[in-house]
Each structure stands twice: as C-alpha cells, then as structure tokens.
Amino acid sequence: MQRRTIVAATTAAGLIAARPPAAQAAGAPPASLDALLAPYLSRFALPALGAAVVKDGRIIAAGTVGTRRANAQVPVTLTDRFHIGSCTKAMTALLAGVLVDAGRIGWNTTIGQTFPNLRLGMDDGLAGVTLEQLLSHIGGIPTDSEDLLKVVLDSQRLEGVNLDAMRRWIIGQWRARPLAWPAGTTFAYSNLGYIIAGAMLESAGTATWEELVSTRIFDALGLTTAGIGPQSSRGRVDAPLGHEIRQDGTLKPILAGPNGDAQPVIGPVGGVHLSILDFATWAGWHAGAGRRGPVLVTPDTLRRLHTKVIDIPPDPNAPPGTPAAVGYGFGWVYGTLPYTHGTVMLHTGSNGLNKAKVLVQPDKDFAMVVATNRDDAHSDEALTALQEALYRAHATPG
C-alpha cells in the first residue's frame, strides 16, 4: 500500500558570467559541525542529523551524525542523501522562472490556456488561475483533503502512462470543482496547486517535471547527489532511511519502495532528495541573489522569485519558532525569527518520514540547511533549535 500522505504542509544589472556553483571548489574544507550536532540525537531521539552553513558563496561549516537506520550502526556521511520534502517547491518555482525567461510560458498564463483540451467542463474560476498564483498558494484551491488524496491515489493506478499524463489526469478529475475563494485573494497552502503548476511546466517544457528539474536545476547547479523519490536505493541502506513512529514511540525504518516516499506524481510538490552539501549549495545560490553564477534566470526574474507575493494572517496558535510578519511567494516563506537580523526566506519540508528546513538571507549572503530522517514534533523542535544555534554562531549581526 502506498503512503497515504501527500506532503506535509508548511505553516509556511546584466547577466553575470557563469562559473561553477558555490560548493567547495577551492580553499579550506568546511569546519565540522559534528560535535554541535551529536547532542541533538539523544535529546530528540533522532536517528540521523545533517546541517550546513553557507556564507558568501562558501560552505563554511557542515556535519552529519547518527545512523542511516534506527537500532543499527550505519553511520551517515556528508555525501548521504536526505529527503527535503516541500523545500522542493522553490525548485519548481525556479524552474518556472527558467521557462518564463525562455518564452515558453508566462507568469500570467492560466490553467485554461495551458490545457485547452481540458477546458470543456472546467470551472471558469479554476480555468483563470495563473501560474504565479499557483506557485504562491493564492489560486483559490483548497489545502489537502481526503478528497484530494483519493484523486492522487487513483492516478497511481493508471496503466501505460508516465507521470506527466497522471498529473494531467488529476487536473481533469478536479476541473469541475469551484474555487474555495476568488483567485489572488487568500493564502491557502495547496499541494494540488503545485501539482497543477508542475503539469503546466511540463506542457511548456515538453518534458516531464522530473526531466526538467534534473537538467535545468540539478545539472545546472552541479547538484550531483540530487534525485527524486526515496533517498535510498531499493534493497540498500545507502542513505538515511525515513522512519515511522510506532504507537509505543519507537522508530520503524522504511526502505525504498511503495511506502518509502509520498506518491511519485507529487514530485513538483516535494519529491527531491540530495546531500546536505548539495542542499547547502542550492541555498547558497539563492543567498547570492545573482551575485555569483551560474546564471539560471535573468536578474528581474530572480528578484521576482525572491519577492513576497501575499501576506499570511498571524496564527494565534502558532508553535514556538514560527516566523513573525509572515508572507509567501514562489516556494518561500518570508518573515523574521526571534534571533534573526532582519527578514529571512525559509521553508520546511517533510514527507511523513523525514524533515528538512532551509533558511536564506540574501542581504547577508547567508544560508543554512538542516535535515533529519524522522518527522514529528520532536524532529521539528530539534531542527528549529538547531537553526537558531547555527544562526547565532555564524550569521553576521546587524
């Protein structure tokens, strides 16, 4: 049986000459974070933990501790792949920027324009939702529900089709439903919106989202460990396995297979895995805000991708560590944390088995990433506390 989860929600000048990405091409290796990370394993009952800090385009500190599999001694390494869940959304948004700059699609291109063969019977409101609205969760499409989960699971039973056809099929099944509210007016974290956005990019790029993100993002940034789906290989414990929490609180490692990740069709929502070093390279590229290569989009497009689109009303019941003055746009949450010097871009990702967090601050050319192979309140508390420790230790005050 496939995992029932879709992807856990989150609260929330001219072109520069291209050159290799910011991973350690030269200079001293990053300082080890292992001694800092180790106490978090026992304190929060984590199997494994990884973290890295990027400053001025260089990974200045990194570490991985723990085991790939609970109740076994299979040490993690800096090249081990961690699943990053919804941190994938910013990759999908960047891919959109690449295709917009190539003239293949526009930010205001609508669902109805992209899929004229599905327009008959499509709700007029849904047909008018734009790519930008989908990528910023303001398309009027509701958050995850059992109804949506059923459609996603049903798509996996289609025979003789690829994932792009499955995504179009999901749109066809959903097309008659009215929007929950007018597009552009209200924030609602919608994984379905990102499935539809991914399908629009497939139509524009004439390839699957998986092919497009692999060639246009992974290859372009030199993310050699990046892939899609379960972070371990079938039949091998060659990466930190995700873990389910049993009723007695013990951890059950989940091997690659039908239950090793969320459904493959939701790749644009949260399907990426990569090493903590490649995760840091990805974050550091954004922190550079175009000051370094490689050039993937024009300066105007990158500024757009780094600009808040919608304010999110404050939640009086938000857990500790939730950013204040929150907004969202193009796969990033915008806000301040009690310990940050100014506004940061951040996101949390999970697939029900793993959890990751990324924080980027372009005005300081600073970024950090943290990840673990457990997904619950303990792991969220651990990563939140670790982010604060790393920021206080490495970010420039003022």
Image (spheres, rainbow, N blue to C red):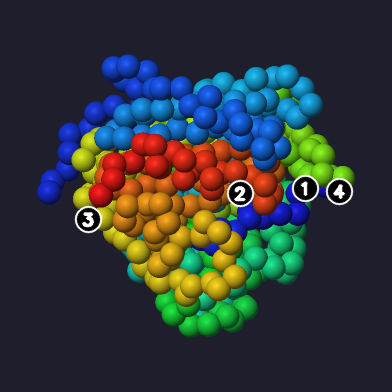
Helix or strand or loop: what does disc 4 sit on? Answer: loop
Q: Give the mark nearest the N terminus, 4 or 3.
A: 4
Counting from the top left corner in percent of width and height, residue 348 is at 53, 51
Look at discs 2 and 3 and give the one toward the viewer: 2
The image quadrant that residue 391 belongs to is top left
Mark 3 is on which residue type? Asp
Q: Give the mark nearest the N terminus, 2 or 1.
A: 1
**Residue that appears at 53% across and 24% down:** 34
The image quadrant that residue 335 belongs to is bottom left
Q: Give the mark nearest the N terminus, 2 or 3.
A: 3
Counting from the top left corner in percent of width and height, residue 277 is at 45, 29
Residue lying at the far left of the rendered structure: 13
- The numbered disc on residue 247 is 4
Query: Relative to 374, does residue 269 appear above or below in the rendering?
Result: below
Query: Relative to 272, does residue 104 appear above or below in the rendering?
Result: below
Separation (CA) of disc 4 from disc 2: 19 Å
Mark 4 is on which residue type? Gln
Separation (CA) of disc 4 from disc 3: 50 Å
Mark 1 is on which residue type? Gln
Residue 298 seen in the current view: yes
Disc 4 to disc 3: CB gap under 8 Å: no
Separation (CA) of disc 1 from disc 3: 41 Å
Which residue is under mark 3?
300
Which residue is under mark 2?
380
Look at discs 4 and 1 and give the one toward the viewer: 4
Separation (CA) of disc 2 from disc 1: 24 Å
Counting from the top left corner in percent of width and height, residue 244 is at 77, 43
Helix or strand or loop: what does disc 1 sit on? Answer: loop
**Residue that appears at 40% across and 52% down:** 339
Q: Nearer the viewer, residue 243 or 204?
A: 243
Mark 2 is on which residue type? Asp
Disc 2 to disc 3: CB gap under 8 Å: no
